Image: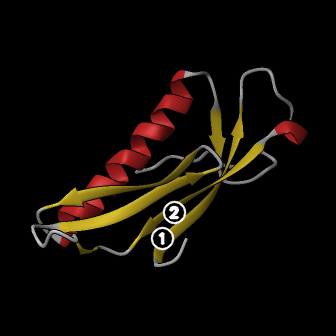
């Protein structure tokens, strides 16, 4: 995603899948930018291939970044609630947690 300042690959093992069936997702956050209306700041966050880039806003650049991380956490929590396990590697040797 253009303007990305942070990106990580996550491998998702849905309930009942094997190592070869893990799905690779990429979580990406863009740099904060002034909102078009001039009233705040905006970042985009995406979880490709599940969620297209979504604009999140904040009163300042730090709160916009916080909102982007909160949106990412909500998406990852939803996967967890569906029984998926998140890993940093395809082999499943290192669990992924957004801290």
Residue 18 — which label? Answer: none
Q: Residue at x 21, y 70 (%)?
A: 35
Mark 2 secondary-structure assignment? strand
Q: Residue at x 58, y 47 (%)?
A: 96
| Mark 1 crowdedness (10 Å alpha carbons): few <14, some 14-19, many ≥20 | few
The image shows residue 13 at horizontal and vertical percentages of 73, 34
Residue of label 1: 6
Q: CA distance from mark 2 to mark 1?
A: 6 Å
Report the residue that reaches farthest toward the front: 37
Is 87 left, or right, of 4 in this rendering?
A: right
The image shows residue 30 at horizontal and vertical percentages of 42, 70
| Mark 2 crowdedness (10 Å alpha carbons): few <14, some 14-19, many ≥20 | many
Mark 1 secondary-structure assignment? strand
Judge whether 41 appears above or below 81 on screen.
below
The image shows residue 62 at horizontal and vertical percentages of 20, 68
Q: Residue at x 58, y 22 (%)?
A: 82
Report the residue that reaches farthest toward the right: 20
Residue 28 — which label? Answer: 2
Q: Residue at x 30, y 55 (%)?
A: 56
Q: Which colour assignment does the render follow?
A: secondary structure
Judge whether 15 appears above or below 58 on screen.
above
Is 24 left, or right, of 60 in this rendering?
A: right
Determine whether label 2 and label 1 are within 8 Å by CB. Answer: yes
The image shows residue 83 at horizontal and vertical percentages of 61, 22
Labels 2 and 1: the sequence-earlier one:
1
> Which corner quadrant of the image does residue 7 belong to?
bottom right
């Amino acid at each position: 995603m253009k303007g990305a300042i942070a990106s990580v690959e996550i491998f998702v093992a849905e309930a009942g899948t094997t190592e070869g069936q893990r799905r690779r997702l990429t979580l990406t956050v863009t740099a904060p930018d002034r909102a078009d209306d001039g009233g705040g700041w905006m970042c985009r966050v995406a979880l490709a291939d599940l969620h297209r880039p979504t604009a999140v806003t904040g009163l300042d650049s730090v709160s916009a970044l916080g909102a982007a991380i909160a949106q990412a956490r909500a998406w990852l929590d939803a996967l967890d609630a569906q029984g998926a396990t998140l890993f940093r590697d395809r082999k499943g040797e290192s669990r992924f947690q957004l801290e």
